[in-house]
């Protein structure tokens, strides 16, 4: 398997057909899938935007889960940052080490940055 950059950013959002908004009973509303961008978001953007939505939905002690929610989002961001650093380091290594390729594939699978295709293509 190998990884290659995908053209996900150029694809229109399937929910709003690229308009960035959808019709509701109360009139137009921002598309919940692309957040008004009109295009499919990559995994990093989509995850970060959803985490921010969760943080905004849980201000203060109203829900009683603010500490757990903050910890979970912190851990998610920290883990994604570590995976980005691993992937970056593997891409910087110009050697043909099998270990680096396996680590790169694993980190990319978690992050979803590049499309995966069979190596023979």
Image: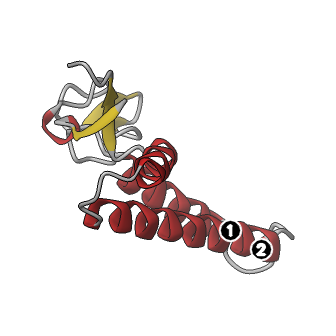
The spot of residue 14 in percent (x, y) is 28, 23
Please tell me whether mark 2 sits on a helix, a strand or a loop. Answer: helix
Give how far across and how far down residue 93 sits, in percent.
Answer: 29, 65
Residue 65 is left or right of residue 104, and the answer is right
Vertical relation: 22 (above or below) 110: above
Residue 21: image quadrant is top left
Report the front residue among 28 and 98.
Answer: 98
Element class at badge 1: loop
Q: Quadrant of the N terminus?
A: top left
38 shown above or below 103: above
Closer to the camera, 120 or 28? 120
> At 38% from the left edge and 53% from the top edge, which residue is drawn?
97
Asked whether disc 2 touches disc 1, contact meaning CB atoms under 8 Å apart, the reply is: yes
> How many C-alpha atoms fall within 10 Å of the one at disc 2: few (<14), some, or many (≥20)?
some
Q: Distance between the residues labelled 2 and 1?
A: 6 Å
Task: Quickly name the residue at label 2.
Answer: 66
In the rendering, at what x and y percent does residue 72 appear? 72, 66
In this view, the residue in front, 117 or 42, is 117
Q: Could you tell me residue 53's position as x and y percent? A: 52, 60
Q: Which is nearer the N-term, disc 2 or disc 1?
A: 1
Residue matched to label 1: 58
Give the color scheme: rainbow, by chain, secondary structure or one colour: secondary structure
Residue 22 in sight: yes
Give the label on residue 96, or none. none
Q: Relative to 85, is 117 above or below?
A: above
């Amino acid at each position: 398997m190998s990884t290659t950059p995908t053209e996900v950013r150029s694809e229109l959002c399937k929910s709003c057909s690229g308009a960035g908004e959808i019709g509701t009973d109360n009139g137009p509303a921002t598309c919940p899938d692309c957040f008004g961008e009109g295009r499919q978001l990559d995994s990093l953007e989509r995850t970060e935007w959803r985490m921010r939505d969760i943080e905004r939905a849980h201000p203060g002690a109203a829900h009683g889960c603010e500490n757990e929610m903050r910890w979970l989002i912190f851990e998610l961001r920290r883990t994604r940052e570590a995976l980005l650093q691993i992937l970056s380091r593997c891409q910087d290594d110009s050697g043909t080490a099998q270990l680096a390729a396996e680590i790169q594939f694993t980190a990319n699978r978690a992050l979803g940055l590049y499309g995966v295709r069979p190596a023979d293509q």
